[in-house]
Image (tube, helix red, strand yellow):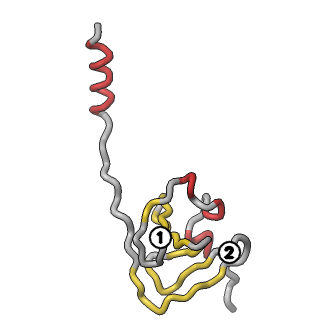
Amino acid sequence: MRLRPALGLALLLAGCALVPPERPPTTVVVAPVRFYLLPGEPRIYWLTGVQPEVFFLGGRYYLYRDPVWYRAPHYQGPWEAVPFWELPRALEGETPGRLKGRLPLRG
């Protein structure tokens, strides 16, 4: 009856798909880079002139590619995925659209 656990494990593993990790994102500077301070605490800056959108917080740059936040020492990378336990609290549950929604409307 040792075959039964081995068969169960083989069937379980057969249903698992191994997906290679996605390549880290790249950023492209499309205009002069400017930093805009978003209202509220802590101090989060939104960078314009960079695609995709980049934010600066606590000495690091952050980029969001659903559902993962990435960080880098420079806004042009190199980017690494941020484990959820290392993500700054200010970014938990946030998206670029929600962060930029803090900016006052220009009239």
Residue that numbered label 2 is attached to: 43
Residue 72's spot in the image, x, y percent?
47, 70
Residue that numbered label 1 is attached to: 72
Q: Secondary structure at mark 1?
A: strand
Q: Is residue 87 above or below residue 11?
A: below
Residue 13's spot in the image, x, y percent?
30, 31
Quadrant in which residue 86 is drawn: bottom right
| Identity of the residue drawn at 68% across and 75% down | 43
Residue 92's spot in the image, x, y percent?
61, 59
> Which residue extends farthest right?
40
Quarter of the picture holding the N terminus? top left
Q: Amino acid at mark 1?
A: Ala
Q: Residues within 10 Å of mark 1 (few under 14, many from 20)?
A: some
In depth, the one of 33 and 59 nearer the eye is 59
Q: Secondary structure at mark 2?
A: loop
| Identity of the residue drawn at 31% across and 48% down | 19
Marks 1,2: beta carbons within 8 A? no
